[in-house]
Amino acid sequence: MIHSTKIALIQLTSNDNPEENCDQIKNYLHDSIAKGARFILTPEVSNFISNDKTLRRRVLSVEYKDPILKVAKEIALKNQVWILIGSLAIKIDEEINDAYSNRSLLINPNGKVVARYDKIHMFDVKIKGKINFKESKYFTPGKDAILVKTPFARLGMTICYDLRFPILFNRLAKAGANLICVPSAFTIPTGKYHWELLLRARALENKVYILAPAQCGQNGPSRNTWGHSLVVDPLGEVISDLGQEPGTSIVDLPI
């Protein structure tokens, strides 16, 4: 008998106000649960998108104080669902300024964080006239690939720019992953040409499902993201595309 799991991808337009982002995520989590989802994913940097160094220092917190994580844990426990917070921008230490992690967190139906993944590959890119971004200025890269065994899948954790490094995906697949998460905040110039192409390639070459919830729209005065949250099957076929507006996508996967 083939079992299936109802999964929800949330597409957001996060900004520099963690409280607004938290309210947005809370509403989408409840909507996803109402539609029957048992595993729900949010995009990269769900809590905060801004290049303002002073604001970042003032509003970001260490992991256990983050309001979105607190809300997600409560909702997971109350509704007995799994939630992947695609990533949070968090302080590494309350006593150290300007040291942050870009961290993905998997929450189980008991409301507990059962896995953490710090983004390994930093998005340091300069495209003349289009992008000048150096993620390594803000975040400390992680070192470890993370595979989690859940009741519904063997789940590999990645974040955004990791997508361009096929060895990481290959390692996860060889370790037993049948589903790999790629929460992202892809830029428009790179997303237009590379987002779908690379996601389909990673799925096909590793024979895994790919779940890629994404940021979309105008996230700030100088930040726009591509959207198009995708679900891709092991044959490299797109089975869900959320387009360019915030919202949720529900898929039933035979995993």
Image (tube, grey):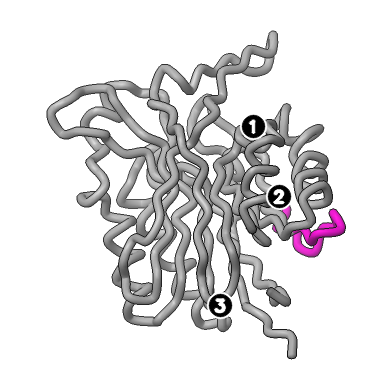
Residue 235 is covered by the magenta coloring: yes
The percent coordinates of residue 42 (x first, y second) are: 51, 56
Residue 125 is marked as: none
Residue that label 3 marks: 37
Amino acid of disc 1: Thr
Q: Earlier in the sequence, mark 2 or mark 3?
A: 3
Crowdedness near tag 2: few (<14), some (14–19) or many (≥20) residues, C-alpha within 10 Å? many
Crowdedness near tag 3: few (<14), some (14–19) or many (≥20) residues, C-alpha within 10 Å? many
The percent coordinates of residue 174 (x first, y second) are: 68, 50
Residue lying furthest left: 95
Residue that label 1 marks: 187
The percent coordinates of residue 149 (x first, y second) are: 51, 65
Q: Is residue 213 in view from this perspective?
A: no
Q: Earlier in the sequence, mark 1 or mark 3?
A: 3
Quadrant of the rendered image containing residue 113: bottom left
| Image quarter in which the N terminus is found | bottom right
| x 54%, y 50%: residue | 157
Front tag of 1 and 3: 3
